[in-house]
Image: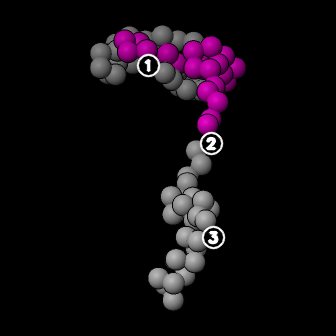
Amino acid sequence: MITIKHTQGVISKTNQKKIPKEHFGKHSNGSEWLYFETKEEKDKFYADNFPPQPIEEVKEVNPLLEALKNTTPEEIAELKALLG
């Protein structure tokens, strides 16, 4: 991993020579760019610093369908009378 200081993401002209021509990714920690020279190095860094978060499944519920599921037979008869 090669570390190069920056100011608001901009690397000075003298430090631009340090940027590797081939790299597998880069990451900024706010004051430095980290250039990864191997894919394994990049994967290890991200695994150590950004562990995968479980993805919660969001179930979208249609309130109208939920209301219809909870209707009584009497309410269904009233709805049919209103619609028909």
Q: Which residue is mark 3?
A: 73
Q: Which residue is mark 2?
A: 57
Compare marks 2 and 3 and give the one earlier in the sequence.
2
Mark 1 belongs to which amino acid? Ser
Over which residues does the magenta segment extend? 29-57
Of the residues shown, which amino acid type is indicated by label 2? Glu
Gap between marks 2 and 3 measured at Cα: 33 Å
Q: Earlier in the sequence, mark 1 or mark 2?
A: 1
Tag 1 secondary structure:
strand
For residue 42, what is the image quadrant? top right
Asked whether residue 64 appears in the rendered view, the answer is: yes
Q: Nearer the viewer, residue 22 or 79?
A: 79
Q: Are marks 1 and 3 in contact (CB under 8 Å)?
A: no
Residue 39 percent across, percent down from the top left: 67, 24
Left of 14 or right of it: where is 77?
right
Which x, y percent locates residue 64? 51, 63
Percent x, y of residue 61: 55, 54
Provide residue 50's location: percent of width, then percent of height. Answer: 57, 20
- The residue under label 1 is 28
